[in-house]
Image (cartoon, coloured by chain):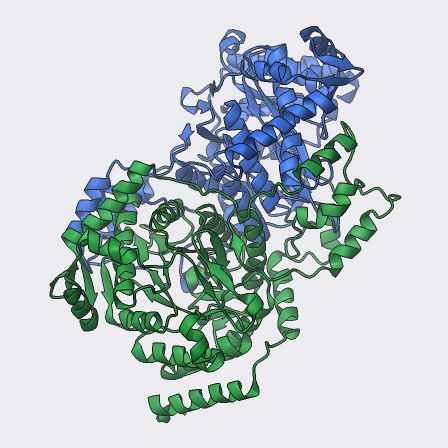
Chain colours: A green, B blue
């Protein structure tokens, strides 16, 4: 299809449209409210069947809490505890779940950057946990502290992210015992978004909360959530001590707990989508119920990370149809419980930022959005099954977030009647480019991406035949060069640095 | 994430799984029944509002039929006709629409390749109309007859296609007046799938039907549809003579008519998604009603081709959120009318088979599937806004079709209870890889793509660091080399060739 020829003589025509477009600056996504009704894969009866199967798993099979504190708490609450195995009655589970808030705010140092997490909203966060980067020159290598800072700089500048991933890539040049301090510091210094803290054990969780308090004030955090702690499950049917320690620290500090069972379909769940949903839901329900047991009213997100496993090679496969369907089911379940839920967008297994990376990522995006997930995590940079944070993909995904957000918001009827008047005015065989309604509304009616290329082949060739990876690397470079740090009081920054120095000494002075 | 380590000592474990996988051959997609409930963007009230707006457009503004026969037919039916402008009363429109069959079969020479088109099913067809190919070596050039034959060979061999595009790419080395004859011949000789004929005017449509009759038998075609005629609208609110001639030829031969208004958002429709839907729906309703007027009971598909237009450059932008939302609305409308509907999958504007190509294509796939479209057209090869048929993308898309088909079918509860027994058997902390349920069901439970790469970075590098484009070119080459033509009686083939020779002479002997 050829490009539309805009009439050259029309007043206020193409030239003025282009000019006003260029002046615009894309605003950061604030709270996105869903305006679509989600895909459903289960009838009400089937949904009830999965829910009941989850409750039966918790009652009859039970679930392991490999943590003495949790076992004591369950025992005191009246659960049937045998060794590490906890058997839970449905009433107890559902009674605890009912204490969870349906909706809450994530705050940051910038009031304009707050977002509401609820079953009706959508939020985007960057990827997490990559040990490598595909850097700004496209070179794959171990990630460093400077890479993490750059990734946080991108997160801060790109309008498509509402939550910083925290440990987006690993600063492998910093000793592991000190690493969490520097990760938290970068989240707080390079960005002013809500962010993910570290959760691996008591100490690192406490350090994460302590550093957040330095930046945000302990008093403010008593009633406001600024940091999320991600608590991964150990499927099938185990919650480990390390994670439960983290859970308690975050929940008791009135910060957000994200509970994520970790599904490797057919490896740690049955080779059946519906039964996988039942098992994962049992795990999630037990974790969610425990969170409310330890801190009634705690802000929680129902999580889930799912891939299927290749029976050819044992490799995890993201974006497969079974995972897409599992998202649909988890969404139906989470809405039944009235708890916001998270899934994963933009996963790919590709070793280079190529067509596979695009296909897989976009399937995952649409999988989450059409199931009306409330937090799309890993929606920035994820490639090579999570082993790489790709800088080019990071900015590509940030743009996809804007597109997905627009889709999720659905259709406005605010100008419907006015637009129908344009249909009457233009009439059969006419055209809309010069019509007053078009000139008034084109900016908001149709989104115009920047990194997706719409040039003709000849124009594209004349401009250097740059593929998406190259365009995105150039964009990432330009953003990092133009980075503006968010304001932070010098005293706060000094206190953060002093905390890091002090804790490094306490943890392991010999690493200096 | 690392690869799962399969236990090495397990009996009947990984080795046997891998072996039985390799022996398998992916079966061609037959009729795919949706097992998901679609995304909705309109409340019942809003849906009614759009529907009523469409009817008001047809009654008050009217629509142009630039064709004397059609104008006469409308006049005779009692419509208000002024010049070429036809004003239609809602009762007349809806009365005619009600004559359309809700469901019908597409047949071919192979009984196993029939598919049902209905509001409950999903069908995949290849792209159409590319003047260029990105060939098997990745070179972009004008397409030839040999390219079209190769594309048809791929269509025939790849299990992901149920309908051949017919004019998938243009045989530019054949003179335009003869071209339709050779396109039809290739559809019939190189494939035995249902396919698209040519519709540009009376003669080419009649030739298309005549050639289908040679291959299928005139008697068979009286009661069976084997060929689809695509009738494009001319938005806003015009149906042209060339297309209406084609429409009548196909409808009167009891073949399928696909009516596709052609949306360039903000160029030939208002800069408003809901009003665009109202206009497009008015156009479609008029075309559908006319089809039933000219041939009551005719098999029809409600079509729609939509892109938004960049206000920066005037270029068409595929896969944008507004188009995705328009799909949702058209789906809701078509279901209201009980007529199967078509949209476009796998569109991209990219000039190379890169990440952009993947993102845009997959968004379009999920857009169509989550709106439960009944015919996903252009689901093979489309790139560069339709200016290119990319061989690599053709095979990549064919695989995506298999994945989307699995998603569309939703979730089976056939083995739910059995799988829950596995949860009990494995228990907390166990693993499923060696469990009897896994061994019995892994093949069907989780799909395993071939062209998406799940190797580790080191394995991938050792195997030559091939990106998706390269892997797909190699695959396309292998398929074309191993191509097996479908059976065809020598006499039928001779008759087809004689028909082509005769018609060439009649049309323009001087081109020889």
Q: List x then y, in percent, for residue A160.
A: 57, 60
Quadrant of the rendered image containing residue A49: top left
Q: Nearer the viewer, residue A267 or B60?
A: B60
Q: Nearer the viewer, residue A471 or B274?
A: B274
- Where does the N terminus of chain A fall, quadrant-wise? top right
Quadrant of the rendered image containing residue A423: top right
Residue lying at 29% horizontally and 68% vertically, measured from the top left: A295
Q: List x then y, in percent, for residue B381.
A: 57, 40
* Residue A79 showing in the rendered view: yes
Question: Disc count in the image?
Answer: 0
Q: List x then y, in percent, for residue B254.
A: 55, 12
- Where does the C terminus of chain A fall, quadrant-wise? bottom left
Q: Answer with left or right where residue A446 lies relative to residue A34.
A: right
Q: Answer with left or right where residue B6 lies relative to residue A206.
A: left
Quadrant of the rendered image containing residue A171: bottom left
* Residue A508 showing in the rendered view: no
Residue lying at 70% horizontally and 37% vertically, measured from the top left: A419
Q: List x then y, in percent, for residue A465.
A: 69, 56
User: Eyeballing the image, is B164 above or below B74?
Assistant: below
Q: Answer with left or right where residue A45 lies relative to residue B507.
A: left
Residue lying at 48% horizontally and 88% vertically, measured from the top left: A495
User: Eyeballing the image, is B353 above or below B460?
Assistant: above
| Residue located farthest toward the right when viewing the structure as drawn | A9
| Residue located farthest toward the left when viewing the structure as drawn | A82
């Amino acid at each position: 299809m050829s490009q539309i020829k805009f009439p050259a003589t029309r007043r206020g025509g193409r030239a003025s449209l282009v000019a006003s477009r260029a002046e615009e600056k894309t605003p950061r996504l604030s709270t996105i409210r869903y305006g679509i009704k989600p895909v459903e894969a289960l009838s009400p009866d089937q949904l009830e069947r999965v829910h009941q199967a989850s409750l039966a798993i918790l009652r009859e099979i039970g679930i392991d809490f490999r943590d003495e504190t949790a076992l004591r708490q369950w025992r005191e609450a009246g659960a049937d505890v045998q060794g590490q195995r906890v058997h839970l009655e449905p009433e107890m589970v559902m009674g605890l779940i009912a204490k969870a808030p349906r909706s809450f705010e994530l705050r940051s140092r910038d009031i304009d950057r707050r977002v509401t997490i609820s079953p009706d909203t959508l939020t985007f966060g960057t990827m997490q946990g990559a040990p490598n980067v595909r850097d700004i020159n496209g070179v794959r290598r171990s990630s460093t502290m400077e890479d993490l800072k750059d990734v946080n700089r991108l997160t801060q500048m790109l309008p498509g992210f509402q939550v910083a991933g925290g440990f987006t890539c690993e600063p492998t040049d910093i000793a592991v015992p000190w690493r969490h301090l520097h990760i938290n510091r970068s989240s707080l210094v390079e960005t002013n978004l809500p962010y993910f803290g570290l959760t691996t054990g008591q100490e690192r969780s406490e350090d994460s909360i302590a550093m957040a308090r330095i930046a945000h004030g302990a008093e403010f955090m008593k009633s406001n959530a600024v940091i999320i702690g991600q608590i991964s499950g150990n499927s099938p049917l185990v919650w480990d001590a390390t994670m439960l320690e983290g859970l308690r620290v975050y929940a008791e500090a009135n910060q957000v707990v994200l509970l994520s069972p970790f599904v490797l379909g057919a490896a740690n769940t049955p080779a059946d989508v519906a039964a996988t949903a039942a098992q994962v839901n049992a795990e999630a329900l037990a974790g969610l119920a425990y969170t409310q047991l330890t801190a009634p009213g705690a802000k929680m997100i129902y999580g889930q990370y799912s891939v299927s496993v290749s029976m050819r090679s044992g490799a995890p496969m993201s974006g497969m149809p079974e995972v897409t369907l599992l998202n649909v089911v988890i969404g139906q379940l989470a809405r039944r419980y009235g708890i916001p839920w998270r899934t994963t967008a933009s996963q790919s297994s590709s070793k280079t930022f190529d067509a596979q990376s695009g296909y897989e990522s976009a399937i995952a995006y649409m999988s989450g959005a059409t199931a009306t997930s409330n937090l799309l995590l890993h929606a920035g940079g994820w490639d090579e099954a999570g082993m790489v944070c790709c800088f080019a993909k990071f900015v590509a995904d940030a743009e996809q977030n804007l597109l997905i957000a627009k889709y999720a918001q659905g259709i406005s009827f605010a100008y419907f009647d006015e637009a129908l008047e344009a249909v009457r005015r233009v009439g059969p065989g006419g055209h809309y480019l010069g019509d007053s309604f078009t000139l008034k509304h084109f900016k908001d009616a149709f989104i115009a991406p920047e990194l997706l290329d719409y040039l003709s082949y000849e124009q594209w060739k004349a401009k250097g035949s740059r593929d998406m990876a190259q365009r995105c690397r150039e964009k990432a470079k330009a953003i990092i060069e133009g980075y503006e740090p968010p304001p932070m009081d010098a005293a706060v920054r000094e206190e953060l640095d002093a905390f890091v120095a002090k804790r490094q000494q306490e943890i392991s002075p010999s690493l200096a």
